[in-house]
Image (tube, rainbow, N blue to C red):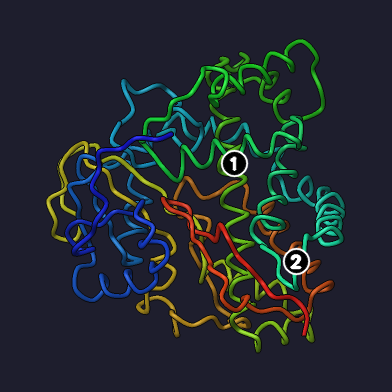
């Protein structure tokens, strides 16, 4: 049971937006387009004061500005991080220079392109198993609940060395932390993410393995092993950022193909187009909005940002800016020039982008191979997530011709 005192009604998205309101992600593209024309830097008093720039130029400038903005807080909530820790709560994404470079460098080896390529067979087998066991009822299946949400859960679980059966726990953590930030939940201590990770870390300390948790417990920085807090924070990052973002990208891509049959049939007929189409689907349906905290008073697009204000970085909105992309609001699956920001900009650009691309490509290839014809189920309701990660949480699809 969660409790919140926030009134989530929104009269004007320019002056009182609420990205946790279900209407926001459901209508995000229209909201960003409207704001871009009349109020490109929106503001709300919610969460203690939050800004929402929607132009590519502003989003890019903030992402590259480590003087006026700190990354210590990346998920907007009513509660800002307490006294700054050297690495932040989920390094390296919550780390500022100069320590950021060191924290990020530690995670580069396990996410190197050649290493990630080695996960393709595992991912493909997983997708085929899911397709073979889809619970289709009267020709309809929820592709979010029974396909897209399982793929990154199982892959990340395997990489971290935790039971894939913990998938339901991962979904609960994501629901509480990313979809309902700042809300209070009645939880027993053993139901928290902190308790879960402490248990898994203790198991790996007692019995080291060839996986990411053991890697983090044994890797050295400046001649010393990471503190338990640092190691646990990096596991938090990999667990949360590696799951919800990717299942949202897969779900959004399936939603697009269900609602755009010409694109779907072209991909089936021209499978060699898939890598280019993947980049366009990422541009058009980028799932991730990050956040920063203003480190000092300054101006943003002529607006007076105060020290301590939240600032959202909606990379999906930047990807639809007509000043940067031709036909920005359209999906052009063979778009040749596509320098999108789906994986972020600046020093925090997603280090898991190779894995996300692999999972998205394989997930679509296996779905289209098994189900080349599908559409939104008549009368079905697509439900979008709330918060800073955008993707379908319920996606009823009618499969077959």
Instruction: Classify 10 Å Cα crowding around label 1: few (below 14), some (14-19), many (20 and above).
Output: some
Q: Is residue 212 left or right of residue 290?
A: right
At 80% from the left edge and 14% from the top edge, which residue is drawn? 207
Tag 1 residue: 171
Residue 277 location (% of width, % of height): 65, 75
Instruction: Classify 10 Å Cα crowding around label 2: few (below 14), some (14-19), many (20 and above).
Output: few
Above or below, comparing residue 64 to residue 285 in the picture? above
Residue 67 location (% of width, % of height): 28, 40
Q: Nearer the viewer, residue 399 or 33?
A: 399
Above or below, comparing residue 374 to residue 90 in the picture? below
Residue 71 location (% of width, % of height): 38, 38
View extreme (top): residue: 206
At 68% from the left edge and 57% from the top edge, which residue is drawn? 148
Q: Nearer the viewer, mark 2 or mark 1?
A: 2
Above or below, comparing residue 125 to residue 294 in the picture? below
Q: Quadrant of the C terminus?
A: bottom right
Q: Secondary structure at mark 1?
A: helix
At 74% from the left edge and 76% from the top edge, which residue is drawn? 399
Q: Quadrant of the N terminus?
A: top left
View extreme (front): residue: 138
Tag 2 residue: 137
């Amino acid at each position: 049971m969660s409790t919140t005192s926030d009134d989530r009604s929104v009269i004007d998205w320019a002056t009182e937006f609420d990205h946790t309101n279900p209407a926001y992600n459901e209508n995000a593209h229209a909201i960003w387009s409207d704001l871009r024309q009349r109020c490109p830097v929106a503001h709300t008093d919610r969460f203690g004061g939050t800004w929402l720039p929607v132009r590519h130029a502003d989003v890019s400038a903030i992402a590259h500005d480590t003087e006026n903005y700190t990354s210590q807080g990346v998920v907007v909530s009513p509660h800002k991080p307490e006294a700054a820790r050297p690495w932040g709560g989920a390094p390296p994404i919550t780390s500022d220079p100069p320590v950021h470079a060191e924290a990020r460098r530690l995670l580069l080896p396990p996410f190197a392109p050649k290493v990630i390529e080695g996960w393709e067979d595992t991912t493909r087998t997983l997708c085929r198993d899911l397709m073979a066991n889809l619970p289709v009822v009267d020709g309809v299946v929820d592709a979010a609940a029974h396909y897209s949400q399982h793929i990154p859960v199982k892959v990340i679980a395997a990489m971290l060395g935790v039971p894939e059966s913990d998938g339901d726990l991962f979904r609960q953590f994501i629901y509480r932390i990313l979809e309902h930030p700042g809300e209070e939940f009645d939880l027993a201590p053993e139901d928290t993410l902190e308790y879960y990770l402490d248990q898994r870390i203790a198991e790996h300390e007692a019995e080291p393995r060839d996986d990411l948790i053991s890697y983090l417990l044994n890797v050295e920085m400046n001649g010393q092993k990471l503190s338990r807090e640092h190691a646990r924070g990096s596991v938090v990052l990999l667990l949360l950022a590696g799951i919800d973002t990717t299942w949202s990208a897969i779900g959004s891509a399936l939603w697009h193909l269900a609602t755009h049959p010409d694109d779907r049939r072209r991909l089936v007929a021209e499978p060699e187009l898939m890598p280019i189409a993947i980049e366009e689907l990422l541009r058009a349906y980028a799932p991730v909005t990050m956040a920063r905290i203003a480190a000092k008073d300054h101006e943003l697009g002529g607006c007076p940002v105060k020290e301590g204000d939240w600032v959202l970085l909606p990379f999906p909105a930047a990807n639809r800016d007509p000043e940067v992309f031709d036909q920005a609001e359209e999906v052009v699956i063979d778009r040749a020039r596509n320098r999108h920001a789906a994986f972020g900009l600046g020093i925090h650009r997603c280090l898991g982008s190779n894995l996300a691309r692999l999972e998205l490509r394989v997930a679509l290839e296996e779905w289209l191979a098994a189900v080349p014809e599908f559409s939104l189920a008549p009368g079905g309701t697509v439900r979008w997530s709330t918060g800073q990660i955008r993707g379908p949480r319920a996606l009823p699809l009618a499969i077959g011709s």
